[in-house]
């Protein structure tokens, strides 16, 4: 049995690389559900045996129907037939239920594993991958894994054994006629093999086109304002139409190739049956079979062998189709994580929250450099502002503090501890973040605030909302704190989303607060409310704020002007305004109109 299984596997997946993927899939996933697959395989063996037995019983059915002198034989044969079909039906039920349970569990496990791998990757992974491509791998890969396992289990445990059993009946009843009938096999295999290369190429292209459909839908959903304002409906419809037609064309090609195997097998089987009838009629092989029952049993076995043979002939086409998804899945699972927790990582010890950069150099690509030999300290419990031209490295500094990336050289410390040697959980428990592009989850207002501290009570959530100047507008929503905010806070205004995000940060009660342009997109009224909330949030907290609006950082304890990855000027606000320098230049540019108005009255 083991040798038969190995030979069949090599025939099903002859390519060494694909064979290795199948072995890995079977060892990692099928093995986890071996109880159900063993049960299904056992039921399939029973199905195969009863199918062969059905063909064998045809001899006795025909003989019993012609034996008018002994009715007991007919009753015994009738009982045997009824028992055989009852057992076969029960085995089919067990097989279907067991395969479904195992397959559904594998899909669930694979999707969980893929998402676990996905979320374990650093931000750089998501910067390099399109979301449509990730979604395609996550959904198609898990389903493809189930399909491959089920195809192999069914082919080995049911179809191959069924075919072997039926061939055994044929050879037992008429050995020479069986040799004639078996000429069908090589011709069918040769025909199917010629189709496989074409299938592989079509499926690779089909996966790309399916990902393009997802990408167009996502871009339309997220950029609908741009689509409408610039009248891009026809252009987007053209992109979607092209992708849809490509998928349709390739799926039609797959259907055509898959459909070829059935007529091929039917034609060859028809010629074989016609030849068998002709040969048996002329008794070329010594007059076998000797009785009508034997001939009927042989022909029945041959005709019943057609279905498993047809399934086996088509399984390689189906496997080639599914293996594209399996490859996509393994590519994601095997993706090297660039940002990992140190094996000996320790929890970040409690402290006052001083952040320091020690000779830090960093770039997003292999050749680019954004931060250059940076030495910078952010004092505990103070507010430090980072200003300067876009692309100078300000947001990168915040990303390095949150350890979304690791420096190429140097180190970032919190209270003297190298954050690359600490656990992710303990580091991020110490940090809160509010950015310009506030992200809210598609759930209620209350749950969006509570995400920062899941164990917080309702009273604590509402207290944080009050501190963020969000409580009053929340109560005016249709369902108050239980109002659904929609995808990324679609049902709230920009100022409301920002205040919910600030409430989330307040609830976290972290020692370090990072603010990245938290008020730049707000109107004057919303900005005033948000600034008031931020004033409460930054009390007794190490705050690092990035701002292009210099009016928002005039109360900062210290300002650093960042340009080209280095600090070009530092000091308190009043000191920097007291002499001509980079900060004074930026300040004069922003307030030039105000000075002109004040001068001219």
Image (spheres, rainbow, N blue to C red):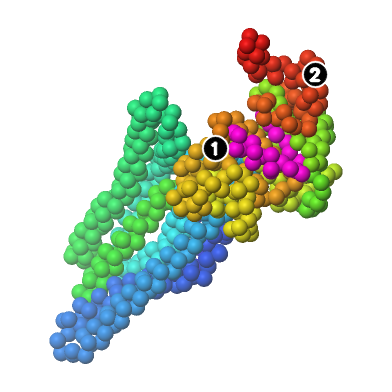
To which residue does mark 2 refer? 578
- Considering depth in this image, is 541 or 203 the residue closer to the camera? 541
Task: Residue at 73% x, 39% y: name it.
Answer: 543
Q: Residue 495 carries which label?
A: 1
Task: Residue at 42% x, 61% y: name it.
Answer: 155
> Residue 201 at what x, y percent from top left?
43, 39
Q: In this view, does 580 lie to the left or right of 271?
A: right
- Considering depth in this image, is 101 or 427 the residue closer to the camera? 427
Q: What element carries label 1?
A: helix
> Residue 239 at what x, y percent from top left?
38, 30
Task: Residue at 26% x, 54% y: name it.
Answer: 266
Magenta stretch in the rendered image: 527-547
> Residue 250 at what x, y percent from top left?
36, 39
Give neighbour class at mark 1: few <14, some 14-19, many 20+ (Cα, 10 Å): many
Task: From this view, report whether residue 339 is shown above or below residue 307.
Answer: above
Residue 58 quadrant: bottom left
Task: From this view, report whether residue 562 is shown above or below residue 199.
Answer: above
């Amino acid at each position: 049995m083991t040798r038969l299984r190995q030979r069949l596997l090599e025939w099903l997946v002859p390519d060494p690389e694909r064979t290795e993927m199948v072995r890995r899939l079977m060892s990692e996933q099928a093995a986890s559900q071996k109880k159900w697959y063993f049960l299904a395989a056992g039921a399939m063996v029973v199905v195969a045996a009863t199918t062969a037995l059905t063909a064998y019983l045809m001899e006795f059915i025909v003989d019993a129907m012609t034996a008018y002198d002994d009715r007991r034989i007919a009753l015994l044969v009738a009982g045997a037939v009824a028992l055989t079909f009852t057992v076969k039906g029960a085995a089919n039920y067990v097989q279907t239920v067991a395969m479904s349970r195992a397959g559904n569990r594998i899909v669930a496990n694979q999707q969980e594993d893929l998402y676990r791998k996905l979320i374990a990757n650093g931000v750089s992974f998501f910067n390099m991958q399109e979301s449509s491509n990730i979604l395609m791998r996550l959904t198609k890969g898990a389903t493809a894994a189930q399909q491959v396992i089920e195809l192999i289990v069914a082919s080995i445990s049911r179809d191959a054994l069924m075919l072997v059993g039926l061939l055994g009946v044929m050879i037992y009843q008429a050995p020479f006629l069986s040799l004639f009938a078996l000429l069908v096999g090589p011709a069918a295999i040769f025909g199917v093999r010629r189709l496989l290369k074409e299938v592989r190429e079509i499926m690779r292209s089909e996966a790309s086109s399916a990902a393009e459909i997802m990408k167009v839908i996502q871009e339309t959903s997220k950029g609908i304002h741009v689509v409408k304002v610039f009248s891009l409906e026809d252009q987007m419809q053209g992109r979607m139409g092209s992708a849809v037609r490509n998928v349709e064309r390739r799926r039609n090609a797959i259907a055509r190739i898959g459909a070829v195997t059935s007529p091929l097998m039917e034609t060859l089987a028809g010629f074989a049956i016609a030849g068998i009838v002709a040969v048996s009629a002329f008794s070329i092989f010594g007059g076998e079979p000797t009785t009508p029952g034997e001939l009927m049993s042989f022909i029945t076995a041959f005709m019943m062998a057609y279905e498993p043979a047809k399934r086996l002939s088509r399984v390689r086409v189906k496997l080639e189709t599914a293996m594209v998804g399996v490859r996509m899945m393994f590519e994601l699972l095997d993706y090297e994580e660039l940002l990992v927790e140190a094996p000996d990582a320790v929890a970040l010890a409690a402290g006052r929250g001083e952040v320091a950069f020690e000779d830090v150099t960093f770039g997003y690509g292999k050749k680019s450099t954004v931060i250059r030999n940076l030495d910078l300290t952010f004092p505990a419990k103070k507010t430090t502002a980072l200003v300067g031209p876009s692309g100078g490295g300000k947001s990168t500094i915040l990303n390095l503090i949150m350890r979304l990336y690791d420096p190429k050289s140097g180190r970032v410390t919190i209270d003297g501890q190298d954050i690359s040697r600490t656990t992710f959980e303990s580091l991020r428990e110490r940090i809160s973040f509010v950015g310009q592009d506030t992200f809210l989850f598609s759930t209620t207002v209350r749950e969006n605030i509570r995400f920062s501290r899941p164990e917080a009570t309702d009273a604590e959530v509402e207290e944080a909302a009050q501190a963020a100047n969000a409580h009053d507008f929340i109560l005016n929503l249709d369902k108050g704190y239980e109002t659904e905010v929609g995808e990324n806070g679609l049902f709230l205004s920009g100022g409301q989303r920002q205040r919910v995000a600030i409430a989330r940060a307040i609830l976290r009660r972290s020692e370090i607060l990072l603010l990245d342009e938290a008020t730049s997109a707000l109107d004057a009224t919303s900005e005033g409310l948000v600034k008031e909330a931020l004033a409460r949030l930054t009390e007794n907290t190490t705050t690092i704020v990035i701002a292009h609006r210099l009016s928002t950082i005039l109360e900062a304890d210290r300002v650093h002007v960042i340009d080209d990855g280095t600090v070009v000027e530092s000091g308190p606000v009043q000191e920097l305004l007291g002499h001509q320098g980079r900060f004074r230049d930026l300040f004069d540019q922003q307030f030039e109109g105000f000075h002109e108005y004040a001068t001219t009255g």
